[in-house]
Image: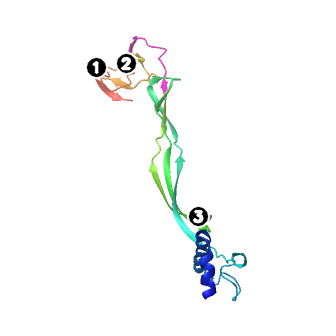
Amino acid sequence: MENIKKRLDSLSVLQRTGLLVIIIAAFFLGSHTLGAPQNSDPTDFKSTSTTSRAVNSSRTETTTESVPYTSSTVYDSSKSSGSNSLTTLGINGVKTITWTVNLTNGVESGRTKVSEEMTTQPVNEVITKGTYVAPTYCPSGTYFNTYGNTVCRPYGSPTTPSGASAICRDGTYSFSKSRSGTCSHHGGVAQWL
């Protein structure tokens, strides 16, 4: 034992620190003899070796994914046929996923999904398409409605004309696109079509 103490005293601070690190590492890895033969000199760094064991651990990790928006079309009879407009801009959503990541010696060896949560809902895109077609036959003339569309003034007909929206109390057909003011100069609405 005295011989070992003399040898330790003769080592530099750096050598002693290195030896201490090796001894501690060997202790935690379960090899108290540093893998050297029983009668070897513990200060002889060339003859020492360590046995390593796999170190398993895990950590929690979150990732995000983009959730695409959908697109839908709305038809509007107050807009001219052939016109298209973007009513609502589509925006992708965000989904947050929580994982348990398994590590072996600090390297990922597998992962398991723990939870999935919609962090931000997507905003769906809406496109408005016009379906209004200006009338071609209007014996009583036309007017511009509140949407700026040309509409036939009410007129009488033996059959229901195409595009009529109501029968007025005086027997004429109205082509109004809104309920407000329909048949107002024709005794009011008798029946909606």
Label annotation for residue 84? none
Label annotation for residue 184? 1
Report the residue marked by disc 2.
145
Q: Is residue 136 magenta?
A: yes
Residues tagged 1 and 3 counted as in contact (Cβ below 8 A) = no
Q: Position of residue 25 (x, y in %)?
A: 60, 75
Q: Is residue 174 magenta?
A: no
The answer to which of marks 1 and 2 sits earlier in the sequence is 2
Q: CA distance from mark 1 to mark 2?
A: 14 Å
Report the residue marked by disc 3.
111
- Using the image as rendered, state which of residue 153 and residue 191 is in the foreground: 153
Splitting the image into 4 quarters, where does residue 1 fall? bottom right
SS at circle 2: loop
Callout 3 amino acid: Arg
SS at circle 1: loop
Q: Residue at x 72, y 75 (%)?
A: 46
The magenta segment? 130-147
- For residue 4, say whether it is visible: yes
Splitting the image into 4 quarters, where does residue 193 fall? top left
Splitting the image into 4 quarters, where does residue 155 fall? top left
